[in-house]
């Protein structure tokens, strides 16, 4: 299931980043904001350079002062190990800073798209099931060979289907939020006059969900027709392959003297090919007809 559904009008690169950033978007939704970048003067990189410089200077002074001798060689090596250990520790801190910088960059890039994506986790259970059905139907169409071979209206599919998924996701997000608040309001015992108002509002929610269900079912009908066209297309390909080798079968039958056994089957092959081609055309026609109902 798509965890993040993005407005198709969002540029592709940013849309991909949105889909990959579910956890960051959840944190942003809950009120998190990225920390501002620290002043350059307080960066760890500058402190790292100062520390390393000081330690190296101490080591050089000790060496030049005659501390390094046969007896003091171990001490020199130990002194050399100190800055290396500190470098490793501070390098790890810098890596963590790099992660923070990258997270801040993603946050700054994505916050301009507030309201142009829907998080599936924010939907209620019923809405998530509907969104999954819509996503699966669209995935079936895009994964089909008849789509890849250009037997469907690929250009319209590429525009219409993501737009349909986005519209469905937006409607379900609004429905889920309003339905949740409605349930909270009516969870306590209602006065008769309040119940009289709440009942038609609940019916309005149900009616809205029915309208979304109709959209999803239209997508599913289209996917079913595409699947039928896919089967007919594959069967047609298989029969065409057999027809291409028909003369080899005929030669073998003639040479083996099995004409009376195989002739009916061979004669039916051409007829089957014609029927499958017609079935393919009917399936494609049905798919195109089903697609027509997806137009707004």
Image (spheres, grey):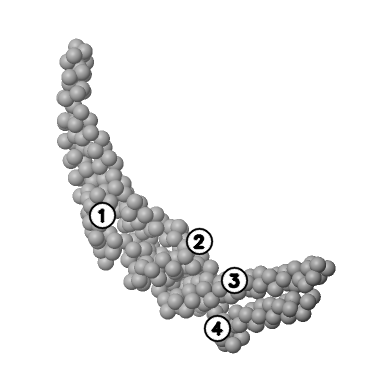
Label 4 element class: loop
First in sequence: mark 2 or mark 3? 3
Callout in the foreground (4, 3): 3
Q: CA distance from mark 2 to mark 4?
A: 39 Å
- Report the front residue among 241 and 37: 37
- Is the Cβ of the residue at disc 1 closer than 8 Å to that at disc 2? no
Q: How far apart are the two marked residues, 4 and 3, measured between alpha carbons?
A: 15 Å
Where is the C terminus found, in terms of image quarters?
bottom left
Could you tell which of marks 1 and 3 lies nearer the N-terminus?
Answer: 3
Q: Is residue 72 above or below residue 282?
A: below
Q: CA distance from mark 1 to mark 4?
A: 53 Å
User: On the picture, is 86 further left or further right than 4?
Assistant: right
Q: What residue did someone put label 2 on?
A: 125
The alpha-carbon separation of the residues under discs 1 and 2 comes to: 28 Å
Front disc: 1 or 3: 3
Label of residue 267 in the image:
none
SS label for mark 2: helix
Lateral position of residue 266 relative to residue 92, left or right = left
Q: Quadrant of residue 251?
A: top left
| Precedes in sequence: disc 2 or disc 4 | 4
137 lies above or below 191? above
SS under mark 3: helix
Tell me the number on the disc at residue 95: 3
Bin the neighbour count of mark 2 within 10 Å (Cα to Cα): few under 14, some 14-19, many 20 and up.
few
Q: Nearer the viewer, residue 77 or 277?
A: 77
Image position, residue 138 (x, y; %)? 35, 56
- Describe the element under mark 1 as helix, strand or loop: helix
Marks 1 and 4 in Cβ contact (< 8 Å): no
Residue 37, label in figure: 4
Q: Which residue is mark 1?
A: 290
Q: CA distance from mark 1 to mark 3?
A: 54 Å
């Amino acid at each position: 299931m798509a965890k993040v559904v993005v407005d198709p009008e969002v540029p592709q690169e940013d849309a991909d980043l949105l889909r990959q950033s579910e956890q960051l978007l959840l944190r942003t939704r809950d009120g998190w904001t990225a920390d501002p970048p620290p002043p350059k003067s307080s960066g760890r990189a500058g402190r790292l350079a100062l520390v390393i410089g000081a330690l190296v200077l101490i080591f050089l002074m000790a060496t030049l002062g005659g501390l390094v001798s046969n007896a003091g060689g171990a001490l020199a090596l130990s002194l050399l190990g100190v800055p290396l250990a500190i470098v490793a520790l501070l390098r790890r801190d810098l890596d963590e800073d790099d992660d923070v910088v990258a997270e801040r960059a993603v946050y700054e890039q994505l916050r301009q798209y507030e309201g142009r994506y829907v998080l599936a986790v924010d939907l209620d259970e019923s809405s998530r099931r509907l969104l999954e059905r819509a996503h699966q139907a669209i995935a079936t169409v895009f994964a089909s060979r008849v789509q890849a071979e250009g037997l469907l209206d690929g250009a319209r599919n590429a525009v219409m289907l993501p737009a349909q998924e986005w519209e469905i996701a937006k409607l379900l997000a609004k429905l889920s939020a309003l339905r949740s608040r409605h349930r909270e309001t009516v969870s306590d015992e209602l006065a008769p006059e309040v119940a009289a108002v709440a009942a038609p509002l609940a019916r309005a929610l149900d009616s809205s969900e029915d309208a979304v269900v109709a959209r999803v079912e239209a997508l599913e009908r289209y996917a079913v027709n595409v699947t039928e066209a896919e089967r007919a297309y594959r069967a047609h390909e298989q029969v065409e392959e057999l027809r291409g080798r028909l003369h080899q079968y005929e030669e073998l039958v003639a040479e083996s003297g099995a004409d009376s056994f195989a002739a009916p089957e061979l004669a039916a092959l051409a007829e089957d090919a014609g029927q499958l081609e017609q079935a393919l055309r009917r399936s494609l026609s049905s798919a195109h007809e089903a697609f027509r109902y997806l137009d707004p």
